[in-house]
Image (cartoon, helix red, strand yellow):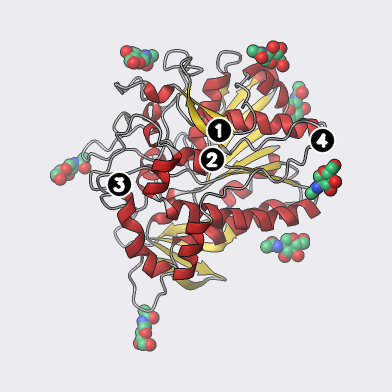
Amino acid sequence: MKFQANEVLNGKYMTLNIPKHVVLLPFSLLLIILPFSLMRNSHESYPQISPVSNLNNTETKECNIFSGRWIPYPEGPYYNNETCPLMLDAQNCLKSGRPDREYLHWRWKPDDCQLPLFNATQFLNRVRGKKMAFVGDSVGRNQMQSLVCLLNHVSQPEDISLKYTSVLESIRFKQYFYADYNFTIGTLWSPYFVRNSDADPNGHSRNSIMKLYLDEVDETWANKVEDFDIVIISAGQWFFRPLLFYEKGQLVGCNKCGIENVTDLGFYYGYRMAFRTAFITLTNLTRYKGVTILRTFSPSHFENGDWNKGGNCVRTKPYTKEEMKLLDFWYVMEIYRTQVQEFKAAQKEATKRGLEFLKMDTTEIMLLRPDGHPNNYGHSKDKNVTLNDCVHWCLPGPVDTWNEFLLYMLNMKREKSAWKL
Ligand SMILES: *[C@@H]1O[C@H](CO)[C@@H](O)[C@H](O)[C@H]1NC(C)=O
Ligand SMILES: *[C@@H]1O[C@H](CO)[C@@H](O)[C@H](O)[C@H]1NC(C)=O
Ligand SMILES: *[C@@H]1O[C@H](CO)[C@@H](O)[C@H](O)[C@H]1NC(C)=O
Ligand SMILES: *[C@@H]1O[C@H](CO)[C@@H](O)[C@H](O)[C@H]1NC(C)=O
Ligand SMILES: *[C@@H]1O[C@H](CO)[C@@H](O)[C@H](O)[C@H]1NC(C)=O
Ligand SMILES: *[C@@H]1O[C@H](CO)[C@@H](O)[C@H](O)[C@H]1NC(C)=O
Ligand SMILES: *[C@@H]1O[C@H](CO)[C@@H](O)[C@H](O)[C@H]1NC(C)=O
């Protein structure tokens, strides 16, 4: 791969071409990529985001933490740009002068219980002596940066990235080490999970066409992942760009390639097969004994234009569920369903092999947060073009909730299995 180190930039641009208003997109695209029956299906099943199915825990009160709503929270965030020196400028919305503050004053309230506050000491005790990796793109790294900030008042890590990789690579393979807890956290950057290469005669650019070898895992993460005890895997925006799909070395179709004779299978196809390969890899690696957590698709919120045509995200408060339904982000739910189907199939195999696969359902809760993105309050903007970031999440911000979920899931797991890894 020939990407520049600033994947912050790249990741941001790999967004779906959403015209003026999200509502307008579906019907044109839809006809190309989805049979009508599927569309009706996705519509009907839209509100049913399934609970964590694998926390079968009848003794401790089980609760679907992913079903709930955002409620006002006057106390505000756990940290800020002064107390966490480790956040990337691209997500440091406070430092970049974002004027509104309301987005910092919401908490996720599950319908049937309270989501416990994040407790950094408790988290570090849970992960003592362990290694945690975020496999995927820069939105996964966004969660890691949030976690590092949440932990920072208890323990400050050493950045050990350069022990393992070059300066150029270190933004993709970031590693922090918490000496007090012998805990390592890092990113294994691989936005497609599978082997890929540039296919555009003019080289790599934000929307250039790429080849994906859907049945061949990208060794850059697969080679390293066996060392990790907790693997949080996710993928998203990169699949929306023009892509050529290969299987068994043969071209089988594409996404938005516009080439005669090459079937446009839509991005769902590539997304599904890439997840399949990633999950098969994890279940098949002989030394891998980790817990795998699928962090489900994190939606972008471009409005008033495409991501590359002045689209932005200027809202300052969450959507209500009613508003979100009106906007009808059907394509997001379709992506969600695609990955969850692959997850469920893989989970069966994994269970047979004594591996644990868990699911962190962030899709619906983040759909409700159009106010949580940097928009133009991030500093990694292309200097020339006014591109807004409606993909990543401000720190602090609603992405901190993912780590509340993570701690909750680790606690549940511990109660269930005495944290056997
Ligand atoms: C869940 O727990 C109940 C009660 O312990 C048990 O009967 C049931 O078989 C479990 N289900 C699964 C899927 O493990
Ligand atoms: C934090 O953000 C404020 C603006 O909200 C800014 O004045 C200050 O310089 C920032 N501090 C750091 C360390 O970035
Ligand atoms: C956080 O966790 C630690 C260790 O489990 C515990 O001693 C402490 O009371 C907790 N803090 C809060 C605010 O719950
Ligand atoms: C630190 O954790 C690693 C596994 O991540 C383990 O192999 C090593 O023995 C631990 N070191 C100490 C001093 O506990
Ligand atoms: C497309 O199909 C036509 C007719 O079958 C064939 O002549 C042509 O070589 C094909 N083009 C490609 C790029 O495969
Ligand atoms: C996974 O491992 C099994 C058993 O070792 C093997 O039969 C199978 O071909 C492997 N699958 C892949 C996709 O590597
Ligand atoms: C900035 O945009 C101008 C006009 O579109 C172009 O000529 C110039 O090469 C661009 N500069 C960079 C650094 O991309």
Tag 3 and tag 4, C-beta contact below 8 Å:
no
Secondary structure of residue under mark 4: helix
Q: Earlier in the sequence, mark 2 or mark 1?
A: 2
Residue ID at (34%, 73%): 259
Count of number-bearing discs: 4
Instruction: Using a 10 Å C-alpha cutoff, classify the residue at mark 3 as few (fewer than 14 neighbours), some (14 to 19) or many (20 or more).
Output: many
Disc 1 residue type (three-letter)? Trp
Q: Earlier in the sequence, mark 2 or mark 4?
A: 2
The CA distance from mark 1 to mark 4 is 22 Å
Label drawn at residue 362: 2
Mark 1: C-beta under 8 Å from nearest atom of ligand 3: no
In the rendered image, is residue 270 in sight? no
Residue bearing the label numbered 4:
417
Relative to 298, residue 203 above or below: below
Where is residue 22 drawn, in percent x and y? 33, 50
**Which mark is nearer the camera, 2 or 4?**
2
Relative to 309, residue 106 above or below: above
Residue ID at (43%, 49%): 237
Label drawn at residue 307: 3
The CA distance from mark 2 to mark 1 is 7 Å
The CA distance from mark 1 to mark 3 is 25 Å
